[in-house]
Image (cartoon, grey):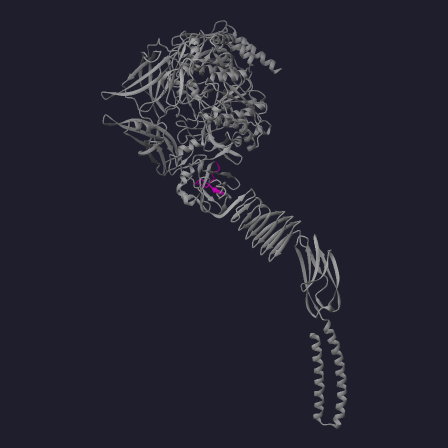
């Protein structure tokens, strides 16, 4: 039902537009002369032969372009009744495409056998043929031009086919021959080589990590990963290995397989992508989109033609993609110089952007990498790039993203070493569009479209890692990345809404005005020279970074509101209006399908530098305004707005007014001590034909003051037509010449047209320093320096002029925001070799930042002076922007005191502000190096071959954490720059970087932390079948080895298989031995598990062993803990004295018991094959009397055992002695009795001495008996 209602609304709207209108092709100027395109630095070297093959671009005017412009605004403006009521391609074809005219042109070209190699929307063609064919068909001949390294051709002649525009040159192909908005690590390394004693921060993120910065997880959690959407990427030529690369990328980051479709526009020549660098660009583009929207379909358009209009028209005609990303651009300065052929292509492309928007396609483009003035001769105007500057394209600038844990913070991608940064500024091509009406203009005289609209990650400090052809990785940056990230994020929204978004810019500005803090991450720090990031809209990052999670809520709640429908046409319908032309503005105004006949309405004629308001009146059919065009030129908006009963409405269309002019040459010479500045140029109609009817026209000159960021009017010059007749070639050259003796400033200068002559051409008069290097001690972006440090200035821009002319002096001054000179230095000349033989003089100097310099954005002012007429005269000056930080931070590094070769060592850095608060966002890297090469640490940090360690913030520890793989004889680890031999000894860790708010680390090498690398080679996480047999540290390895490992340390969990002798090894971790025979001698063993193995442990200490179907033999070794647990033994037979036969009982409890053996003084006396209670009889009489050790040993099947010992005493022979003594005692008793009797008798009959003799005899007898008994016992 919704589709039916939408169709009714659109049909009603179209009918209201077409009342009083007709489908007309706008008339062209009758003259269609194709002039040669002579680019600065090129010269004509000949005429192309008649059989040379060339390409020509042909444009056929669209139908109803006023309707086209009116409709696209209605469909893209939030609140409009037609908001997001997109058209089908069939509707587009019927309303706007010149189908009949197209076939007429095709038929005409076929008569001359010309080939159309690409076409789109029945209105643009890329035609190929020989010079001879084009001369016959279109009246064109071709010149060949060269700058000694590149060549291009350009057509000359009067086009004989009416009703078309022709671009007859392949110079546009040169414009897209290389990626413009891509920065690689190699490029920044080359810049860093110019600095001594400075350090460069090289680190990056993985692309999928960046989704955190845009709150994409809100959509991921809801299941929206780009499902069902299609993202178009335009990359010239292609990449022959893109499918293999993205498959590797998916495996690397665990992403679902990418769904990619490759669509050539023109011949498919992917190998040129490798040669030109577009393969790197395509790698970045595809990987960035896929990282944000893993389930989105990706269509890669690979043009080999240089016609942007045909490319965009082809995308519209296919109508297969929802978003188109373009990471390329042409600077407006280039467009202004070659407007005669570029502007017709751009205007045709603009119509195609509108058509795509009507179909619901969203176009996004990179704003550029040139900062605020790098593309425009050191001045801000004409620095922006097309297509990003188109009002119908979302311009995406660059930020610097700092990730920390699961959070992020973003600042501007500021000026980088060597220039560059997020491009932003004010267009000199397009007036300010309707959705930017509330923005204030930075220049009062220029009311142009402002870019960027938003910004996403683009800085290479830190960059992102991209997989290239061959599956290698490289660190890259640039706004090429930011536009692709945004395209991927838009895919998530489309996936959720189930509807396209079309022209997004009006919605972006609607969100910014109503929900700024929710819809965007404001960017408040950074600069791109001369613009500074601030809260709200700025010319560095636009509105800031998108909070895509909130967009998914806020955009879905946009509802229509009462609004008038206004559609506009201009009569007469011309493609090129001129000053003094009378036009009629016709506006059909309705509300809910009903014509509005009263109210207040105005027509506004808005150009880049003026705005005139005219009242409209209702003539019974339409609202009419009769206007005379006066003092306007270029692209001009015809705006109609007003109200009826409090209901408002606005719409606009664009027309082109006046002539195009360009300057082909500006030079100075001296006459009588007066400097004359001379200019040569041309003036054209919009279709590129020379306007020879204009005999003269004025131009204005302004100089740019970098200190005030203003243009100052100097003088005007009258340009007069002159005819130069060529004696060499087949054409005469018309040009306009003028000169002035006004004393002009030697600096960035802007040449503008006056009245109906359109043009804004930047030049640099005098000796310029464009291309100079401004390098801070910590090389990163932003360029920032702390007080008491110096800035390196190397004026490479001047060096060539120095060689050619000589005698110039360069001074540099540091100027504060209020214009005060803080310090100055005179640059000194140094020689540099340009291989192989040319030496050039380069001015180099160090500009000191004094202590107590207040923080802020400062200007470095370069002055070039030279001797002219024996007088020192200022001959050039230029300004550069830097940030002076309030102080520097000093990382406090913690690392283990000792480490092994090849070890992965984790270290920490505590980084705090002076008030003690933690620095938790920024980019910090560590350089690890042997102490003996500490003097080269600066060059090491700048080397492409040196892998710096990126630190990440650990919120649990409030410290920055990193890890480094130390070098070894097997692998140099992170220190690949080292020569062999630097493996052990004193090493240092040096941490460098910037906080998110521009505070640099100290550059003092004394802040490095030292540690010692021991002479052991760490081998970890490897499958090893060969090994260093001595002084190795093995960690988490699988080892298959036969031989001896001596003085080896084992950490972590290692597995060993083989016949190995381990001598004096330290097994500190766990070792699993399987199917092996191992002998360990003199080592320490922490934990071993043996499976199906035999171990001989000799003179070693073993803390823990686990045996599985294995045996171990312990020799002079100690085991503390065993698994399975050893048996328990108890003897119920107590210690004591025993005789005869006794019962010996033991209780043995255990598993895997092989036998239980009883030993008496080490001699086995009994063996049992069971455990439990074991009893046997011991006949003690078989053993001599005495003390014995009775030992029970329970042997396990693995060779380990448990034992229990008691002491017992045998006394069988003593028992016999006791009996003898008892008998003796009885005998003695009897003898004693007998003696008593004898004494009694003798007492009466004998003398005393006889009694004593008898007693002696008895005692002797007893002694003999005892001696005999003792002798028997010893036996």
Q: Position of residue 446 (x, y in %)?
A: 39, 19
Q: In the image shown, does 388 or 18 lie closer to the viewer? A: 388
Q: Which quadrant would residue 294 be assigned to in this image? A: top right
Residue situated furthest top in the rendering: 620
Q: In the image shown, does 734 or 696 lie closer to the viewer? A: 734
Position of residue 479 relative to residue 1265, above or below, is above
Determine if residue 432 is in view. yes
Q: In the image shown, does 681 or 893 lie closer to the viewer? A: 681
Classify residue 209 as left or right of residue 1256: left
Classify residue 97 as left or right of residue 661: right
Q: Position of residue 423 (x, y in %)?
A: 43, 25
Q: Position of residue 49 (x, y in %)?
A: 40, 14
Which residue is located at x 72 percent, y 71 percent?
1211
Position of residue 66 relative to residue 403, above or below, is above
Classify residue 524 as left or right of residue 1156: left
Look at the image and say whether residue 27 sits in the magenta stretch.
no
Q: Which quadrant would residue 1208 be assigned to in this image? A: bottom right
- The range drawn in magenta is 907-921
Q: Position of residue 184 (x, y in %)?
A: 45, 30
- The mark tally for this picture is 0
**Quarter holding the C terminus?**
bottom right
Classify residue 894 as left or right of residue 493: left
Look at the image and say whether residue 908 sits in the magenta stretch.
yes
What's the magenta bit mostly, secondary-structure-wise?
Answer: loop
**Quarter holding the N terminus?**
top right
Determine if residue 1150 is in view. no
Q: Which quadrant would residue 612 be assigned to in this image? A: top left
């Amino acid at each position: 039902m919704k589709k039916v209602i939408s169709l009714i609304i659109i049909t009603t709207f179209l009918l209201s537009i077409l009342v009083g209108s007709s489908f007309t092709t706008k008339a062209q100027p009758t003259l269609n002369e194709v002039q040669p395109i002579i680019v600065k630095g090129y010269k004509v070297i000949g005429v192309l032969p008649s059989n040379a093959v060339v390409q020509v671009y042909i444009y056929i005017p669209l139908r109803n372009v006023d309707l086209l412009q009116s409709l696209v605004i209605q469909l893209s403006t939030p609140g409009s009744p037609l908001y997001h009521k997109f058209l089908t391609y069939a509707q587009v074809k019927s309303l706007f495409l010149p189908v009949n005219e197209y076939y007429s042109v095709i038929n005409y070209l076929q008569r001359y056998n010309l080939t159309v190699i690409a076409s789109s929307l029945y209105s643009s063609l890329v035609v190929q043929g020989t010079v001879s064919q084009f001369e016959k068909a279109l009246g064109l001949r071709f010149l060949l031009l060269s700058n000694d390294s590149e060549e291009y051709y350009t057509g000359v002649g009067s086009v004989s086919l009416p009703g078309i525009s022709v671009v007859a040159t392949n110079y546009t192909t040169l414009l897209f021959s290389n990626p413009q908005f891509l920065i690689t690590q190699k490029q920044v390394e080359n810049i860093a080589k110019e600095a001594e004693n400075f350090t460069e921060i090289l680190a990056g993120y993985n692309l999928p990590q960046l989704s955190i910065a845009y709150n994409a997880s809100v959509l991921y959690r809801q299941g929206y990963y780009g499902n069902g959407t299609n993202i178009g990427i335009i990359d010239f030529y292609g990449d022959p290995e893109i499918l293999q690369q993205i498959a590797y990328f998916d495996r690397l980051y665990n992403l679902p397989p990418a769904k990619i479709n490759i669509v050539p526009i023109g011949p498919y020549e992917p190998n040129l992508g490798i040669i030109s660098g577009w393969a790197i660009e395509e790698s970045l583009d595809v990987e960035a989109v896929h990282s944000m929207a893993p389930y989105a379909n990706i269509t890669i358009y690979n043009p080999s033609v240089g016609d942007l209009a045909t490319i965009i028209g082809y995308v519209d005609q296919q109508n297969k993609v929802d978003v188109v990303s373009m990471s390329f651009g042409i600077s407006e300065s280039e467009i202004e110089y070659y407007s005669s052929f570029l502007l017709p292509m751009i205007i045709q492309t603009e119509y195609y952007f509108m058509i795509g928007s009507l179909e619901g396609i969203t176009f996004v483009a990179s704003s550029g990498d040139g900062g605020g003035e790098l593309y425009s001769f050191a001045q801000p105007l004409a620095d922006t790039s097309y297509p990003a500057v188109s009002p119908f394209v979302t311009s995406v600038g660059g930020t610097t993203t700092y990730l920390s844990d699961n959070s992020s913070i973003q600042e501007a991608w500021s000026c980088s070493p060597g220039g560059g940064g997020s491009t932003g500024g004010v267009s000199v091509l397009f007036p300010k569009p309707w959705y930017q009406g509330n923005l204030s203009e930075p220049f009062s005289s220029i009311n142009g479209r402002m870019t960027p609209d938003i910004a996403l990650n683009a800085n290479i400090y830190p960059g992102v890692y991209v997989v290239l052809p061959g599956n290698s990785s490289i660190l890259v940056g640039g706004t090429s990345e930011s536009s692709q990230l945004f395209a991927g994020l838009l895919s998530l929204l489309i996936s959720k809404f189930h509807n396209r978004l079309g022209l997004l810019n009006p919605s972006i500005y609607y969100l910014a005005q109503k929900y700024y803090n929710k819809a965007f991450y404001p960017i408040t720090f950074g600069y791109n020279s001369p613009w500074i990031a601030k809260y709200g809209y700025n010319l560095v990052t636009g509105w800031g970074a998108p909070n895509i999670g909130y967009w998914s809520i806020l955009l879905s709640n946009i509802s229509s509101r009462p609004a008038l429908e206004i559609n506009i046409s201009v009569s007469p319908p011309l493609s090129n209006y001129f000053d003094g032309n009378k036009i009629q503005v016709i506006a059909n105004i309705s509300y809910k399908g009903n014509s509005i006949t009263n109210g207040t309405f105005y027509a506004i004629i808005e150009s880049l530098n003026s705005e005139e308001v005219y009242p409209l009146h209702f003539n019974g059919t339409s609202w009419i305004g009769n206007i005379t065009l006066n003092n306007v030129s270029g692209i001009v908006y015809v705006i109609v707005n007003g109200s009826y009963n409090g209901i408002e409405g606005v719409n606009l269309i664009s027309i082109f007014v006046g002539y195009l002019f360009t300057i082909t040459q500006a030079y100075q010479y001296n006459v009588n001590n007066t400097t004359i500045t001379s200019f040569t140029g041309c003036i054209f109609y919009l279709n590129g034909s020379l306007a020879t009817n204009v005999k003269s026209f004025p131009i204005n000159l302004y100089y740019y003051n970098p200190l005030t960021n203003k243009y100052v009017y100097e003088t005007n010059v009258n340009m007069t037509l002159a005819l130069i007749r060529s004696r060499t070639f087949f054409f005469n050259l018309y040009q306009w010449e003028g000169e002035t003796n006004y004393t002009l400033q030697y600096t960035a200068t802007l040449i503008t047209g006056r009245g109906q002559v359109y043009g804004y051409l930047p030049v640099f008069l005098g000796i310029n320093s464009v291309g100079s290097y401004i390098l801070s001690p910590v090389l990163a972006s932003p360029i920032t320096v702390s007080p008491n440090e110096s800035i390196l200035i190397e004026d490479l821009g001047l060096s060539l002029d120095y060689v050619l002319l000589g005698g110039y002096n360069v001074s540099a001054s540091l100027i504060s925001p209020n214009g005060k000179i803080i310090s100055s230095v005179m640059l000194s000349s140094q020689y540099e070799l340009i291989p192989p033989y040319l030496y050039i003089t380069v001015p180099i100097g160090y500009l000191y930042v004094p202590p107590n310099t207040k923080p802020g954005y400062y200007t470095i002012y370069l002055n070039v002076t030279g001797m002219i007429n024996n007088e020192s005269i200022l001959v050039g000056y230029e300004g550069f922007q830097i940030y002076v930080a309030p102080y520097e931070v000093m990382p406090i590094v913690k690392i283990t005191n000792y480490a092994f070769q090849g070890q992965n060592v984790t270290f920490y850095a505590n980084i705090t502000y002076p008030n003690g608060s933690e620095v938790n966002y920024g980019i910090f890297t560590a350089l690890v190096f042997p102490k003996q090469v500490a003097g080269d640490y600066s060059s090491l940090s700048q080397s492409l071959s040196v892998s710096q360690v990126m630190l990440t913030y650990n919120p649990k520890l409030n410290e920055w954490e990193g890890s480094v793989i130390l070098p070894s004889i097997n692998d140099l680890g992170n220190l690949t720059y080292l020569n062999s031999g630097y493996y052990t000894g004193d090493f240092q860790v040096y941490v460098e970087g910037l906080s998110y708010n521009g505070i640099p680390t100290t550059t003092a090498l004394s802040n490095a932390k030292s540690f010692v690398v021991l002479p052991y080679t760490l081998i970890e996480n490897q499958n090893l079948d060969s090994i260093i047999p001595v002084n190795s540290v093995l960690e988490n390895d699988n080892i298959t080895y036969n031989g001896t490992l001596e003085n080896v340390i084992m950490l972590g969990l290692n597995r060993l298989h083989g016949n190995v002798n381990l001598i004096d090894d330290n097994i500190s971790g766990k070792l699993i031995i399987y199917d092996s025979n191992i002998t360990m001698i003199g080592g320490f063993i922490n934990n071993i598990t043996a499976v199906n193995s035999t171990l001989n442990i000799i003179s070693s200490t073993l803390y823990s062993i686990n045996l599985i179907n294995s045996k171990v033999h312990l020799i002079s070794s100690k085991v503390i803990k065993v698994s399975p647990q050893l048996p328990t033994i108890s003897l119920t037979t107590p210690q004591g004295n025993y005789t005869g036969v006794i019962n010996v009982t033991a209780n043995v409890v255990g598993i895997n018991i092989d036998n239980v053996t009883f030993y008496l003084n080490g001699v086995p006396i009994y063996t049992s094959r069971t455990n439990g209670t074991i009893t046997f009889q011991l006949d003690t009489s078989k053993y001599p009397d005495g003390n014995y050790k009775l030992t029970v040993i329970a042997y396990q099947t693995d060779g380990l055992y448990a034992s229990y010992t008691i002491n017992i005493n045998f006394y069988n022979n003593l028992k016999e002695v006791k009996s003898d003594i008892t008998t003796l005692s009885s005998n003695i008793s009897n003898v004693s009795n007998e003696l008593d009797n004898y004494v009694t008798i003798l007492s009466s009959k004998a003398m005393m001495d006889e009694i004593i003799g008898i007693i002696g005899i008895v005692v002797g007898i007893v002694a003999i008996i005892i001696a005999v008994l003792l002798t028997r016992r010893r036996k």
